[in-house]
Amino acid sequence: MSFWDHLEEFRWTLIRIIIALLVFSVLGFIIIPFIFDSVILAARSSDFVTYRFFEKAGEYLPFLPDFSADSFNVELLNINMTTQFMTYISTSFSFALLLCIPYILYEVWRFISPALYENETKGVKRAFGLGGIMFLIGCLVGYFVVFPLIFRFLITFELSDAIKNSISLDSYMSNFYTLILIMGIVFELPLVFWLLSNLGLIYRSFFRKFRRHAVVGSIVLAAIITPSGDPFSLIVVTLPIYMLWEISAFVVKKDPIEEDDELPIVLD
């Protein structure tokens, strides 16, 4: 194919992706009003599944924070005329983008696959599949673990009894999107390390050598993500981040020197 043929194919790839986003956005416009309270705003109520889970766990693990406050119910305020409407639009688009991720990856794969050799095709296909799955897992961890723990801590923290917390809708949504997106990106670390390994820049021995550093780095990153500072939240966020390090160590290539050492020695 000529340069202009590639450009035309790329144009049609973008058109198909945009059409898919528009279709799913329309679906989002229909669905979002029915799931906004029960899904997106669920963390503001003590009935949220994460709070209930840790409340039950606290009966057997007394060192856990108290999640049994049935009166926990945060009222959100809207202080701008357009905030609710713009939130409706942005949430519908975010819903469409999340559902379209598999299709977008498929279209990107379709566009680049003709330029790959046969031995590269399997690896890149695996990378796209792993990247999409890990991103969704990261978003779920952000939704069910990171965001509710941070939100509950910040909303119950009081510098003074004279100050009452009034949370605006745009503040809630901004933190909601940011934390879930951050966790989705963090869970792409295994894919990044896998790509670096294929380029010959990193090997499995690197992960063994710096495992202790990874533990400290995971704790530091968890402390940045969770400003609450309590040991429970820190541990809950640290564990999945460190598990990404171990998963990365599993998917990267072995050191070529180690592979040579494993070869049997044939004596003449």
Image (spheres, rainbow, N blue to C red):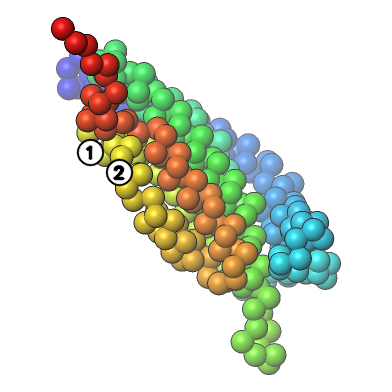
Instruction: For label 1, count other residues whose C-alpha is less than 10 Å away and answer few (under 14), some (14-19) or many (20+).
Output: few
Q: Nearer the viewer, residue 26 or 77?
A: 77
Which of the numbered marks, if any, corresponds to residue 206?
2
Q: Position of residue 124 (x, y in %)?
A: 35, 25
Image quadrant in which the C terminus is located: top left
Amino acid residing under circle 1: Leu
Earlier-in-chain disc, 1 versus 2: 1
Q: Is residue 91 visible?
A: no
The image shows residue 125, relative to residue 149, as above or below, that is above
Q: Position of residue 24 (x, y in %)?
A: 57, 35
| Element assignment for label 2 | helix
Looking at the image, residue 106 sits to the left or right of residue 37; the answer is left
Looking at the image, residue 223 sits to the left or right of residue 116; the answer is right
Instruction: For label 2, count other residues whose C-alpha is less than 10 Å away and answer few (under 14), some (14-19) or many (20+).
Output: few
Q: Is residue 213 visible?
A: yes
The residue where tag 1 is placed is 201
The mark lying in front, picked from 1 and 2, is 2
| Element assignment for label 1 | loop
Looking at the image, residue 90 sits to the left or right of residue 259; the answer is right
The residue lying at 60 percent from left, 38 percent from top is 26
Amino acid residing under circle 2: Phe
